[in-house]
C-alpha cells in the first residue's frame, strides 16, 4: 500500500521537474549564444549574441558588431536592431552581416529545445547556448 507521504513526495518531485523543464525551455535571457553557421571564407569568426536579462542584445557578427533589443511575449519575438558598427568589413562579410541583422528583424516566433534557440521567420536561425 502507498502511503500519503509517498504520494505527496511524488507529486512534489513531479512538479519540481516540470518547473525545471519549463525554465530550460524558456527564452534564454541572460545567456550568450552562437549562431549555428560556418565561418566566412578567410575567417574563423562565427556570429554570437549576448542576451541580457531585459532582452538587450550585444551582437558580434562576422565582421560588424552592435546592439539590439528582443521583446518576447509567449512564443512571439520581435528583434529591433540598434546601431551597428561598420568596421571596414570586406564586402562579402558586410553583406552577410546585413543579411543576418535583417533575418533577426524578420523573426516572428521562437522555440527552444535545451541549448538550442530557433528564431522562426522567412529565414530560420539556430543559436546554441555557449557552454562555460
Image (cartoon, rainbow, N blue to C red):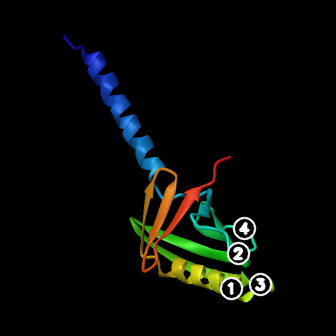
Determine whether the residue tagged by mark 1 lies in a helix, strand or loop: helix
Q: CA distance from mark 3 to mark 2?
A: 13 Å
Outermost residue, front side:
41
Q: Which mark is residue 92?
A: 1
Rendered location of residue 24, percent (x, y) = 47, 48
For disc 2, the neighbor class at 10 Å (few under 14, some 14 to 19, many from 20) is few
Tell me, yes or no, whether the two marked residues, 1 and 4, touch with CB atoms within 8 Å.
no
In which quadrant will I find the N terminus? Answer: top left
Outermost residue, bottom side:
91
Q: CA distance from mark 2 to mark 1?
A: 9 Å
| Occupied quadrant, residue 60 | bottom right
Outermost residue, top side:
1
Tell me, yes or no, whether the two marked residues, 3 and 2, touch with CB atoms within 8 Å.
no
Q: Which residue corresponds to mark 2?
A: 41
The residue lying toward the viewer, choosing from 55 and 122, is 122
For disc 3, the neighbor class at 10 Å (few under 14, some 14 to 19, many from 20) is few
Outermost residue, left side:
1
Determine whether the residue tagged by mark 4 lies in a helix, strand or loop: loop
The residue lying toward the viewer, choosing from 4 and 115, is 115
Between marks 3 and 2 in the image, the one whose residue lies nearer the viewer: 2
Q: Is residue 28 above or below residue 108?
A: above
Asked if residue 111 lies left or right of residue 6, the reply is: right
Chain-order first, disc 2 or disc 1: 2
Determine whether the residue tagged by mark 3 lies in a helix, strand or loop: loop
Q: CA distance from mark 1 to mark 4?
A: 14 Å
Rendered location of residue 70, percent (x, y) = 54, 71
Chain-order first, disc 4 or disc 3: 4
Q: Which mark is residue 89?
A: 3
Q: Which residue corresponds to mark 4?
A: 45
Amino acid at each position: 500500500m502507498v502511503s500519503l507521504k509517498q504520494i505527496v513526495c511524488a507529486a512534489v518531485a513531479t512538479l519540481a521537474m516540470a518547473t525545471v523543464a519549463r525554465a530550460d525551455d524558456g527564452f534564454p535571457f541572460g545567456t550568450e549564444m552562437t549562431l549555428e553557421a560556418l565561418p566566412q571564407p578567410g575567417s574563423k569568426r562565427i556570429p554570437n549574441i549576448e542576451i541580457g536579462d531585459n532582452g538587450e542584445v550585444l551582437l558580434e557578427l562576422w565582421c560588424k558588431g552592435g546592439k539590439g533589443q528582443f521583446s518576447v511575449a509567449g512564443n512571439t519575438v520581435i528583434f529591433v536592431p540598434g546601431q551597428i558598427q561598420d568596421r571596414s568589413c570586406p564586402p562579402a562579410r558586410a553583406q552577410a552581416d546585413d543579411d543576418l541583422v535583417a533575418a533577426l528583424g524578420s523573426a516572428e516566433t521562437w522555440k527552444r529545445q535545451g541549448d538550442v534557440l530557433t528564431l522562426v521567420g522567412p529565414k530560420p536561425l539556430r543559436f546554441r547556448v555557449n557552454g562555460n
